[in-house]
């Protein structure tokens, strides 16, 4: 793995560090369509999607990104056929079992976002092992949104804050956005600068509803199994050309 690019670097080796993002979030969409378009079972598309995730994590580290969040399994995905849900669970297990030691050695800290409610015991054990094994790492944050929904996260955080208020751990006068964010799954992680969705769809699908309030949205017409480093760099280049105003006026506006 190479070091982060210098300010003078351009081209395929990485973008310049001018306006370089701190956090990228990705909705990994299109596994099923990729498989269907090739006459293959949807499970094969999900397997290729895991390969794309490996490439993307490696590329993110290679170009000097510090935080990456990927949408792996939503709270709405339970509506899919049991066979596909089980296949998605199996892929998470396969990814962690194959890559955990390597990621830990590379300084990657893994955080699983989402509710643990309803998850099978073997998945819960896997989540615990991945987080504990990498808890002290600080070089790169990999957040995997699994059994995650943005609205569910906000509701769960609100309930946790209410309990803290009832217990006297926080006063009503101290309730503000910064305090509330400490109850979110992403506490300690900066909000995403870029939110990418693959497959050509144009919606957030209940992903990081709070955190993505001012993220730059990049919708890419590529199915997730075909996603690679050049797509990541393309998204960063799109981001660098935009002006982020956070509700204010454009620079130079009267």
Image (cartoon, rainbow, N blue to C red):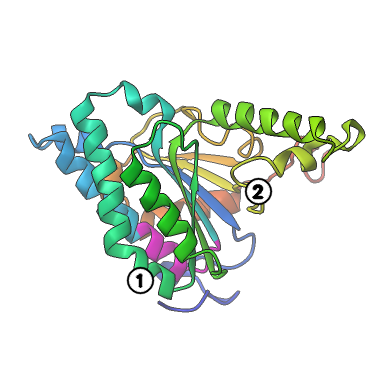
Q: Is residue 60 magenta?
A: yes
Tell me where residue 202 appears, x and y as whole percent.
44, 28
Q: Is residue 30 above or below residue 226?
A: above
Could you tell me which secondary element the residue under label 2 belongs to?
Answer: loop
Q: Which mark is residue 187?
A: 2
- Ranked by sequence position, the earlier of labels 1 and 2 is 1
Left or right side of 87 for 160: right
Q: Nearer the viewer, residue 222 or 213?
A: 213
Which quadrant holds residue 79?
Answer: top left
At horizontal 41% and vertical 32% (from top left) the residue drawn is 74
Left or right: 44 in relation to 186: left
Q: Determine the CA span between mark 1 and mark 2.
A: 25 Å
Q: From the image, tell me which residue sits under label 1.
A: 102
Give the image location of residue 122, x and y in percent. 31, 46
**Left or right: 75 as drawn, with respect to 177:** left
Task: From the top left corner, tell me how far across and down residue 232 is, in percent.
Answer: 42, 55
The quadrant in which the N terminus is found is bottom left
Q: Position of residue 71 (x, y in %)?
A: 43, 41
Residue stretch in magenta = 56-66
Classify mark 2: residues with Cα within 10 Å, few (<14), some (14-19) or many (20+): few
CB-based contact (under 8 Å), mark 1 and mark 2: no
Q: Is residue 15 above or below residue 193?
A: below
- Residue 2 highlighted magenta (yes or no): no
Q: Residue at 27% across / 63% down in the picture? A: 98
Q: Residue at x 82, y 45 (%)?
A: 252
Locate the C terminus by quadrant.
top right
Mark count: 2
């Amino acid at each position: 793995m190479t070091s982060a690019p210098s300010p003078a670097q351009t081209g395929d080796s990485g973008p310049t560090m001018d306006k370089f993002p701190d956090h990228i979030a990705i909705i990994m969409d299109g596994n099923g369509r990729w498989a269907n378009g090739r006459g293959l079972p949807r499970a094969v598309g999900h397997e290729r999607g895991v390969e794309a995730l490996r490439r993307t994590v490696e590329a993110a580290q290679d170009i000097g990104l510090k935080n990456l969040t990927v949408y792996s399994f939503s709270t709405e995905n339970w509506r899919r056929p049991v066979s596909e849900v089980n296949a998605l669970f199996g892929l998470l297990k396969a990814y962690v079992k194959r890559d955990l030691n390597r990621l830990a050695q590379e300084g990657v800290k893994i955080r699983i976002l989402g509710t643990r409610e309803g998850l099978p015991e073997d998945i819960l054990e896997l989540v615990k092992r991945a987080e504990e094994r990498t808890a002290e790492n600080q070089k790169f944050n990999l957040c995997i949104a699994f059994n995650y929904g943005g609205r569910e996260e906000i509701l769960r955080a609100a309930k946790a804050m209410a309990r803290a208020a009832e217990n006297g751990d926080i006063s009503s006068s101290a309730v503000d956005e910064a305090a509330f964010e400490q109850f979110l799954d992403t506490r300690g992680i900066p909000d995403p600068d870029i939110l990418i969705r693959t497959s050509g769809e144009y919606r957030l699908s209940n992903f990081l509803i709070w955190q993505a309030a001012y993220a730059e949205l990049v919708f890419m017409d590529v199915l997730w199994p075909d996603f690679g480093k050049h797509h990541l760099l393309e998204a960063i280049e799109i981001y660098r050309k935009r002006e982020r105003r956070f509700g204010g006026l454009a620079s130079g506006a009267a």
